[in-house]
Amino acid sequence: MNKVVIMGAGRVGETTALILAKQEICREIMLIDVREDAPQGVALDIIQTSPFFNFDTRVGGSNDASDLADADLVVITAGIPRKPGMSRSDVLETNVAIIDGIVDDILQYAPDAMILVVSNPVDVLTWRVWRRTGWPRERVFGQAGVLDASRMATFIAMETGFSSRDITTLVLGGHGDSMVPVPRFCTINGVPISHFIDEERIQAIIQRTREGGAEILALRKNSSAYDAPGASVAAMVDAISHNRKRLLSCVAILQGEYGQTDIAMGVPCVLNERGLAEILELDLNAEESALFQRSAAAVSLDIDRLES
């Protein structure tokens, strides 16, 4: 991949750019933000780490949307963050106006790019971007499941003492209180987690996963999470840039999968150089399916708010 543009030079955008640069996932990174001089400062700070991390990725900052030109992938992190006590849906009205303006700029300056939505509420905003662009769903997708799965894996590692490298987890549904961690598909080097953790502790881990972002927000008080979100975005960009065909849980536009249509939800997806290459439809049991449909109903409420 040649050029990645990050719309929004806040904490998530900055962390994403630093990781992409350090790992040399692309040749050029451009941070664009409406705040005068802010993205230029972030870019200069990142590029000055290159002697320590041994990368030569070009990193720039701009306040001009025309610098979207020639982007292979646009990562949208712009928007207001939630504050303690707020849900992700509480920032919907403000952030959708911001996203609409960004999408219009992308349509004008980068009509051939793919779009990765990170801003919250990510499910409904991914749907909004898809509808506003009119592009195929392969080119518009969102980040959430990768982050939620990493949180769940971390909590399992903390519970068991095993290395997080050996832990595989799966989280479906909306990125919020109704997300659906699926312990049946969670393993430690291939062994189901139920072999190591009793049901009561598994349920506690599931609940902590659902509240993972809120827990960090409550502890930090003046900031949402940004390190793990940035790393999650970088993992997705790496899969696309290097055509890895990775199976990751992403926010995707559903067109009949899991009994849902015209909605964006977290589901297992294959990412390759074309973007979202495939959606894997799992055979969920009755309990898992009911939880997924409940999560879909919550996302649909936000979509209905936009349409009304």
Image (tube, grey):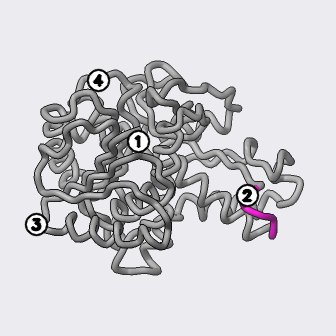
Residue at which label 2 appears: 165
- On screen, residue 9 above or below 100: below
Q: Mark 4 or mark 2, which is nearer to you?
A: 2
Residue 103: percent from the left, percent from the top? 19, 39
For residue 215, say whether it is visible: yes
**Residue 51 part of the magenta-drawn span:** no
Q: Position of residue 110 (x, y in %)?
A: 21, 34
Instruction: Give yes or no for contact between labels 1 and 4 (Cβ–Cβ under 8 Å).
Output: no
> Within 10 Å of the Cα at label 2, are there few (<14), some (14-19), or many (20+) other Cα atoms?
few
Task: Mark 4: give few (<14), some (14-19) or many (20+) Cα within 10 Å.
Answer: some
**Residue 301 visible in the picture:** no
- Of the residues under marks 3 and 1, which one precedes in the sequence? 3
Mark 2 residue element = helix
- Inspect the image, locate mark 4, and give the three-letter code of the amino acid beneath it: Trp
Q: Please, is residue 42 above or below residue 165 in the view?
A: below
Boundaries of the magenta span: 161-165
Residue named by callout 1:
142
Tell me the number on the disc at residue 135.
4
- Disc 4 vs disc 3: which is toward the camera? 3
- Report whether 204 appears left or right of 132: right
The residue that disc 3 covers is: 36
Foreground label between 3 and 1: 3
The quadrant of the rendering that contains the N terminus is top left
Which residue is found at the position 30% from the left and 32% from the top?
113
Q: Mark 1 or mark 4, which has the lower sequence index?
A: 4
For marks 4 and 2, give the CA distance. 36 Å
Q: With 169 as the anchor, is 35 left or right in this view?
A: left
Q: Is residue 27 left or right of residue 272?
A: left
Q: Secondary structure at mark 1?
A: strand
Q: Nearer the viewer, residue 132 or 116?
A: 116
| Residue at the (43%, 38%) spot, across then down | 297
